[in-house]
Amino acid sequence: MANMSINLVLYHGSLLPHELVPSQLRLSRTRVLATNRALQVCTERWSCSASSFCCYCFHFKGCSCRWKRLVRSCFTTESVIASDENYGNKQVVSLTPRLYDYILKNVREPKILRQLREETASMRGSQMQVSPEQAQLLAMLVQTLGAERCIEVGVYTGYSSLAIALVLPESGYLAACERDAESLEVAKKYYHLAGVSHKVDVKQGLAAESLEFLIMNGEAGSYDFAFIDADKRMTPKYFELLLQLVRVGGLIVIDNVLWHGKVADPLVNDSKTISIRNFNQQLMEDKRVSISMVPIGDGITICRKNRLIF
Ligand SMILES: C[S@@+](CC[C@H](N)C(=O)[O-])C[C@H]1O[C@@H](n2cnc3c(N)ncnc32)[C@H](O)[C@@H]1O
């Protein structure tokens, strides 16, 4: 079996031998989707940091053929050089599985968050959870701001909201907006286990309605920090509502702004990608906020609400 080797990559819809895939394609993550024991075929899914290509790589287990070595060689390239000469051939890091493992080893993930992440791993939608290094950054932003009042849009099983609640002071408050009752049960269990239930006000229902209610309730300008991580086409709406709720100098952080790289691929034009791309473009021109797009997880943009001087 070891001599029978096949290693193909699905590249823009066509199966190509791996070596024919352009060299600038950086394979950044691998996840075993399925293993067929009878055939001893291992199917891995690869996503690529340089673009949004979806690649499926098939190889026989235990095979050390040159195809596999070629795949391995992709792991050694851990930086990208800006292709635009105006950036002075600036080298920026490109996440490979090896480098990402290293980053994960350098995340200080509280035990309770690890337990929640592990429990969620077997649940439907677990890929929606923010990554540990993202949660750590959110927590640090909350701490750095000295935030007391926070809002999250899109709680799922509570990983990012728990990371925020853990660093809020005892008097802190987090309005956690989520429509799905089942995932909220897990979130509530972990707020309780972590001893932060008193800081978290779960708002079950449609997030836009919950945010509108907070505004009607006279809470505009009273929040320090907001995190948006729900239905992507609604992000512009959430952003506008949160801009009312957050104080000047407060932060609104938006997740999935790189959308697995699709935003940069002109060939990808599905409605979610277009919506995120348009939103990113609008933010570029929005003087109400200072912005910083950070390539962590699936990409976040940190927006600081500015005082507008006319
Ligand atoms: C990406 S997940 C959130 C992940 C979460 N931040 C974490 O780290 O675990 C998105 C969540 O938004 C919720 N959601 C989607 N549309 C919503 C809406 N209109 N109102 C409230 N929640 C919504 C989904 O049910 C889902 O649980």
Image (cartoon, rainbow, N blue to C red):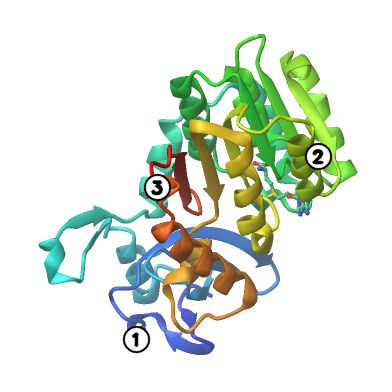
Residue 102 seen anywhere in this rendered image of the structure:
yes
Q: How dense is the environment of label 1, judged by Cα within 10 Å: few (below 14), some, or many (20 and up)?
A: few
User: Which residue position is annotated with label 2?
Assistant: 213
251 sits left or right of 164 in the view: left
Q: How dense is the environment of label 3, judged by Cα within 10 Å: few (below 14), some, or many (20 and up)?
A: some
Instruction: Give whichever of 197, 91 is nearer the camera.
Output: 197
Name the spot of residue 138 as percent of width and height, x first. Answer: 51, 33
In the image as oriented, which residue stretches furthest toward the right?
181
Instruction: Give whichever of 178, 3 is nearer the camera.
Output: 178
- In this view, 284 is above or below 99: below
Q: How dense is the environment of label 2, judged by Cα within 10 Å: few (below 14), some, or many (20 and up)?
A: few
The nearer-to-camera label among 3 and 2 is 2
Q: State the quadrant of the N terminus.
A: bottom right
Identify the residue shown where x is 50% and y is 59%: 30
Q: Is mark 1 within 8 Å of ligand 1?
A: no
Asked if the residues shown at circle 2 and circle 1 are in contact, with their CB atoms under 8 angstroms apart, the answer is no
Which labelled disc corresponds to residue 56?
none
Residue 46 seen anywhere in this rendered image of the structure:
no
Identify the residue shown where x is 34% and y is 75%: 66
User: Which residue position is annotated with label 1?
Assistant: 20
User: Which residue position is annotated with label 3?
Assistant: 291
Identify the residue shown where x is 34% and y is 86%: 20
- The CA distance from mark 2 to mark 1 is 55 Å
Amino acid beneath label 2? Phe
- The CA distance from mark 3 to mark 1 is 39 Å
Q: Which of marks 2 and 3 precedes in the sequence?
A: 2
Name the spot of residue 45 as percent of width and height, x first. Answer: 55, 67
Instruction: Check disc 1 and report its element: helix, strand or loop.
Output: helix
- The CA distance from mark 3 to mark 2 is 27 Å
Name the spot of residue 164 as percent of width and height, x first. Answer: 60, 27
